[in-house]
Structures are given as structure tokens and as C-alpha cells.
Amino acid sequence: MDTQRFEQIVARISTVVLGKEPQIRLALTCLFAGGHLLIEDRPGIGKTTLAKVLAKCLGLTFQRVQFTSDMLPGDILGVSIYDQNSGSFYFHPGPIFTQVLLVDEINRAMPKTQSALLEAMEEGQVTIEGETRDLIPPFFVIATQNPLEYAGTFPLPESQMDRFLMRITVGYPDRGAEKDIIRGGGTQKALAGIKPCMTEDDVIGVQEEVGNVHLSDSFLEYLQNIIAYTRSTPHFHVGLSPRAGIALAMAARSWAFIQGRTYAVPEDLKKVLFQVAGHRLRSASDRMEIPETRLMALFSEVPVPV
Amino acid sequence: MDKRQEFIPPILLALFVAILPHVAGLPLWVIAWCAFMWTYVMVAIKHNRPPPGRFVRNALAVIGLAGLLLTYHTRIDATAYVSLLAIMAAIKPLEISTHRDGMVTVFLAYFIVITSLFQSETLLMTIYMFVSVLVTTAVLVRINDPAGRLKAHFRLSALILAQAVPLMLALFFLFPRLEGSLVGFQRSDFGITGFSETLRPGMVSRLVEDDSVAFRVEFDDGIPGFEQLYWRGVVFVHFDGSNWRHERWLRESAPPETGVNDGVSYRVILEPHRSRWLFALDFPLMIPDTGRLYEDFTVLSRDPVFRTKRYVMTSDLRDHTGKTGFPGDELIRLPGSGNPESRALAARLAESSDSPGEVIRRALDYFRDNDFVYTLTPPLAGRNPVDDFLFSARSGYCEHYASAFAFLMRSAGIPARVVGGYQGGEINPYGNYLIVRQSFAHAWVEVWDEDKGWFRVDPTYVVAPGRISDGPGDGLQPGAFGGFTGRYLQPFEALLRQARFGWDAFSKNWQAWFEGYSVEQQKALLERLGIAYSYRTGPLMLLGAGLSLVALLFGVYLVIQLRGKTEKPDLVKKRYEEFLRKMAHAGIARLPGEGPMEFAERAALARPDLAPAINEITGIYIMLRYAPLPHDPDAPGKLADGVKKFRPSAVASKD
């Protein structure tokens, strides 16, 4: 895949999600890196539309689950049902047996149900009633959630948040784009007309190529400077984990790849830094998340090795 | 990937450059063989044809060897050896398929380059060999880095060569010099002329048109007059009626007792002539360490002179040796019969004279008074060559005069012998030294007298005095020298002569310092350094010292290696920091958290006039810092250049 092809994909998704190209790029970066994506914003902004169009565009099998407060793990993983004719149990697979799982409003379900996703997201397998079943790769979870201050939500535990490679926000559309959205009266028709931009093989190939993007010693030095900064300075409640370090490297690789490069530079890391690190870091003073501008200002103190 | 397409063209280039100096010397079929094989290989790889199979290759090798055997039989000399290398070099490219094959073939090319020394050691050849090694090394670099740029390969090759020069000089001065020929092979014998052990009529005159240099001489205190410059080479004693032959069994002797202690001192730079003669002015007093003086006052080198030889001598320039004992009947012996008229003439001269001195004078008068002609083209002699010369033809070159005169002397009972060598010389105004060419070859007579000992009589001088005072061309009958070229080249003659002298002076210095660097010079150098050097054990000592030095250096290298790599200075970092300093000086400082791209973008926006340079430097820097290996080998150089040339003014130029 080259940058031209990538731009085509971005353009096609933009016909549905208007005026949100940077977010589309970041979302694709996350998926090409083989990571799970969390889209967070207020209701009505177009999170679900973005998630759906991404899922559709990747050309993979697709399932959607709307999380609610009364949802149970079995509703996602599947259950064994007694068949009266044969007199035995047979497994009825849940929606998780797919390649792209769109989890809408993930923070509306109870933590118990949220945790049902953990094993699937980390290991690509599920264990149901003592039996482990593999999921077919590539397996992505694209989840959407409302910000925590909204009523009727259960905040995701930190361990769950860490499973998402990147978290992006969508934000209000600009005036021109919003005009088009309102005039169109909704995205359902556009969404229905969209065709897959990639195939399963394409996705696997891209993931492989992203994995081959070169990380030089200088790059890794910068990455470690960043991690060390989160651990050694007093701004953060807890520093970034080694898993976060891996996540940063993968995301930077993916960004470098869509720029058409075979090696990552510090700028690639900076582009994805907030999306990868933002949901993993809390302020030391109030244990709250740190806004993007503030976080990036802090990170600008980290020296790039010459 | 097929290595053939990558490897073969550069390797063929290296082989071609290496073989080129030998083209004139190799048998024609060997040249054709090389040309055919190489052309075939080029065509084959162009059309992607597979290489010939094992059977064909073996058959070619056998045919090549058989050809060599037919050409040379068992005469293994330098050309045979080079021919073998050439034949193998021609078929080796047929089987190159791996990297290793390529390397082996390049080493073969190096080997062939060395063999150029069989041809000559002149300045030109040395320069050519340097070029050859440069090309071959570049090819070696190229087959190890096929993707790189040719220019970079040559640059690296030149660098390696430059680094090798100190080692080369050290080896040149200190590696034990050996007398004799290189690695046991005799150098090929084209174009080497000079004296042999027999003086035949026509032998000296054959040399007259040979312009090549026999030797060059530098005198310590001015060049003596030409009529004193008799360069003694070989003494002919035995006469068989037409030819004079050298005495093989000679005893060593002390220098003649001329009564003179400090003669004329001079340095001779002798061209290789494959014999042992060392030419010396009459009469030698002091001779070089590696030479020996014999009873006939000729000087012979211990070994045949296969390489340019430089030696210092002192001679007494008087024309006689001083009192010596009667040389023996051998010196008045003549064949039992033949040349009766000459014998009769000698008898008449002896009868009517009171002393040997008068016999000599009257014999010379005979030449002077009978219209003898000095010419290169005398009529062919019959059964009695001396009679024919003295009484009917009366024309000839110096060897005829010398031979006839010596015959007359012996017939009259006076000991006499013929001396072969060179007479005179040509002064090179550039450098003020004497050039003695083959064309100065000469033959004269030495006669024994009770009081004076051996003394020189040159009958040619009587006939053609100009020959002695002005050089070999003078006094010759017209037609002897090429009048045609002379006439047409006249306007350029002065210029040509000047150029020729200039070049000769240049090559003389080269020879004196490089080719003529021999055991004696090495000994002198070492002794100046305070190291005693003997000819017998010296080479072994030097070799041992050299080997210990190499072992020591290798040991030091190993220690450094084992200690772990010494911290290599990060040049990329240094260059980029220099760039950042220059930018800061121009008012745009990089922030610590700024990546190179961000900085370049910001800087280019602030200073559009510098944008191209900034982007170029940043691009190379990012490539070197972040891209996977291997990097473009030129990139560090380009970065250094770019940063060096980058000179931002403090304020953007206003458009």
C-alpha cells in the first residue's frame, strides 16, 4: 500500500464523516497498527458513524453490540443452549466471533460485562464455560463511549483502558461541514452506499508492513526519554508502562508507514502521542485526565536526541 | 540474484587493465584467446545465456595448457608465466557465479599487475601499475557493494591506496634487496642489446643505430674530455682468424699500479643488460662492493644485471696502466695460417723498426696514408678478412680497425688485445650528466709495453678523429645515418632534442632513486641509520625484523580489538550540531523537544531563502539517523559538505 492508496481511503471515508480527516487518519493508524480503537465524545457527534464506516471500509466481517446497563457477558461471548431434540447443549456464538466488533457506548455496561472483552482484546481468544476458542484474526474492537461526566455511565477500569491502543475524540464539525450534514439530514444513506476499500488480505499485509517499519536507536532513545519523563517528573500520577511503550512504538510505526516511510522519526511519535498516552495518564494533582494542549506542552520539554 | 551480471563487467575491466602492458610481449594466440573469451562472456551475460558447463571449461583449460606447452616447451621464463596467467584469466570469468569466484578473480588481476615488473621498472610503468591497482581495488570494492556509486568506489580505492603508500615506502626501503632477477624468473629479453663474449665483424656497427641508453654517468668534479672517455666493458683475447673471443677464466686482480691514488670519481646508473659487465672508465681504481676486478681490468658484477644498477667507481684516466709483467704467450698467439699478406706487412714493419713503439707508429701511419674509409657498410669479407680489410676493401667500422690492428701487432710479436666498450657520451644539459647510448659502442686495442704496461691505441682515431671527439655519427660516410628523417625533422630537431634531454633527466633521477635502489644503497641507508648490514646475513636480519614488526603491529591491533571498540565519534551528530549552531547564529534556534522535521519546517518558513539547504541537510540527517542500514555510503560526505557550505546570513536577504 502506498500513500496514494491511503489518501483514497481517507477521502472515501470523508464522504460519510464530513470534515474529520485528521481523526480518520488517526483511526486508520490505530487499526493498521493492529490496535483497538476507542472513540470518545459527546452524544450526537458522529462517533458511531465513524466506527461503522471504518469497520465497513476495512472489508472484514462486522458485528455491532449496543452496550446497555443490563447487558451480561454471555450476550457478547455467546451461550450454550440445551437442544431438546438432540438432548444436548450446543454453543451459540455471541457477536464477538467476528473480525471487527463495534461496541457502542461501552461505558454504559457494568464493569463485569466490560471485562468480558479483556481476554478477546489482548489475546485474540475467548474462554467460555472453561473452553477456549480462538477468534479469527485480524480482530479489532472499535468502541465508542461518552465522556465520564455524563449520567448513567460506568467508567472503564484502567486495565481496560490500557487495552485500547489509541483513543480519539471526534469533536464538533466545523460550520461548513455541519451545514452539509444538516442539509443531508443524516448519514444513513451515505453509509449504506459505502463499499469496502480493503480486503482481509490487504489488512493483514498492511499490518505486516507496519511491523517492519524500522525503529532506529535514536528513535528509541527519544521514546524512552518520553517514558522516563512520565515516570520521573511530578506531573503524573503513574508513569507509562512498558506496554504503553510498545503501544507508542507501534502507533508511531503505523503513522510513519502511512506517510510512506520505512522508518519512524520523532515527529511520528509526537503525532500519535496524545492519542496513545492520553488515556493512560492522569494528573498527579487531581487524578483527572490531562487535556491535550497541557499534555503536549509538558512533552515538548522532552529533548529529541540529536 | 544472478551475480554474473553484476560482477563480470567490472572484473573484466580489472583483468583487461592488468594484462594491457603485456600485450606486446605475449604470443598472438594468447591475446586472441583472451579477447575471444572476454567478448564471449560479455555477450553471454548480455543475452542472459547460462555459463558453459564443467566439461567445456575443463576442456578449455586443457587446450590452453597444451597451447602453452607447444609454444614454450619447457622454457619457463617470464612470458611463459604471464601467458599462463593470461590464459587462466581469460577462462576464469566463464565460471564466475558466486561472490567468492569474483573475489578470487580480482586477486588474479592483482597478481597479473605485479607481473608488469617483468616488463620494466620505468617511471611510466610504475605510474601505470598504480592506475591498475587503483582500478582493481575499485572493482574489489564494487563487487562487495554492487548498489553503490562507481565514483564512491574509486574514491574508496584511492583512499586505500593512499593509506598503503607509507607501508609501500617502508617496504621499499627496508625489504631485503636481492641481486639478480625478480622471483627467479629472467626478465623477457626484448630490446636488450649490448656486448657478448665474442666480437664479430659487424657487431659494434649493428649497435650504431640503436639509440637506447646503455648507462648514465654523473661525475663528481666535471665531465672529462671526450677523448678520455673510454668505457671499458670486455676484453677480447682469443683470435680465430675472424672473431675475437673473451677469456672465460680470469683471475681477480688488484687495480693497476698507475701511481695515481685519487682518480676521477663517478656514479654509473646502468640499464639492465643481462650480462655481468660493469662499465668503467680506463683504468678502474676503486670498484663497488658487489663487483670484482679481474686481471684484464674488466669489472664484473657478482650477478647478472637484470635490474637497473647504480654503482660508484673511481678511475685513472691515463691511457696506460704502468709497468706490468709480460702477459704471456697467449697475447701474441695467432691462428696457424690465414691472412698471409697481413703477416707479411707486420714482418716488414717489425724488421724496419727499432722498437715496439715505432712498429705501432708505423702501423698507424699505414692506416692514415692508405685512404682508409670509416663506414658502417663495408663489403663482405672473404676467407682472409684481415687481408681483405687492409689491402682491398680498406673500409670498415671500429671493430675492423681494432681487429686488424691487433692482428698486425701480434704478427709483429707485440702482445695486443681488443677492448670492447663505449666511447664518449652525450652531455645532458638538464642535470649535467653523461648519457651513453648503445650507439656509442666502440672497440679499440691495448698493446703491452715493458715500461708503460698496457696502453691504449685506438686506430679508429687515426682514420676518423671526429668519431672520438664528436660522437659516433661524425666522420661516417654519408648514407650511414638516416638523411631522410634528418632533413624533414630539422626544424623540430632542437625542440625534440630539448624534450628528449628533459625526459631523460627525469627518468635518470627516477632510475637513480627507484630502480637503482640496490643492495649497496640499502646498506648505505641502514648504515646511516646506525645498523650494521652485511650482505650475507643482512637480508635475513631485515626479514626477521620486518616479521617481528608485523607481528607486533598485529598484536597491538588485536589488543585494541579485544578491548572493545574504541568510542567512535558520532560524526552525524557532530555535523548536525554544527548545522544547528549555524541556524542559531542566524536567529533560529532549535527547541530541545523539536524533532528535525518540525525544526526544518519552522526554519524554512522563517527563512525561505535558506529552505532548500535546510531541507537538504535535514533530509540526509534524518536518513542517516533513522533509516535502516545500509545507508547510502555517500551520505555522510554529503552531509558534511552541505553543512560546511551552509552559511546563513544573520538576517534574511530582502527580496
Image: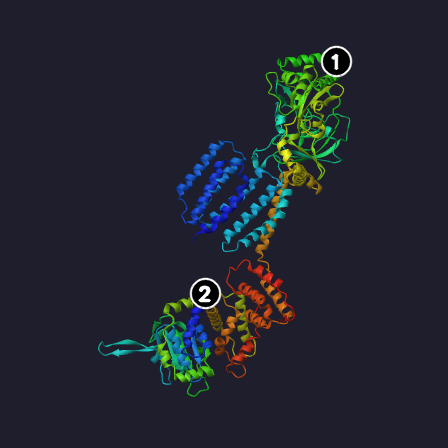
Within the image, what quadrant is residue B390 found in? Answer: top right
Rendered location of residue B332, percent (x, y): 67, 16
Quarter containing the C terminus of chain B: bottom right
Given the image, what chain letter belongs to the residue carrying mark 1? B
Compare residues A236 and B303 and report the one nearer the observer: B303
B267 above or below B617?
Answer: above
The chain containing the residue under callout 2 comes to A
**What secondary structure is found at the residue carrying circle 1?**
loop
The residue under the point 65% across, 42% down is: B173
B332 above or below B428?
Answer: above
Amino acid type, callout 2: Asn
Measured from the top left, where is residue B26 in percent x and y? 52, 36
The image's mark for residue B353 is 1
Determine the image quadrant of residue A305: bottom right
Query: How far apart, in angstroms, are the residues tagged by discs 1 and 2?
Result: 113 Å
Residue B109 coordinates in the image, percent (x, y): 52, 44
Task: State which quadrant residue B312 falls in.
Answer: top right
Task: Say whether residue B646 is left or right of residue B27.
Answer: right
How many numbered marks, from 0 up?
Answer: 2
Residue B647 is labelled as none
- Most foreground residue, A144 or B30: B30
Tell me whether marks 1 and 2 sit on the same chain. no
Residue that label 2 marks = A212
User: Given the current orientation, which residue lies at the most extreme bottom position?
Assistant: A151
Q: Amino acid at mark 1?
A: Ser
Q: Which corner quadrant holds the N terminus of chain B?
A: bottom left
- Using a 10 Å C-alpha cutoff, classify the residue at mark 1 as few (fewer than 14 neighbours), some (14 to 19) or many (20 or more): some
Q: Residue at x 55, y 43 (%)?
A: B113
Q: Is residue B201 visible in this depiction of the protein?
A: yes
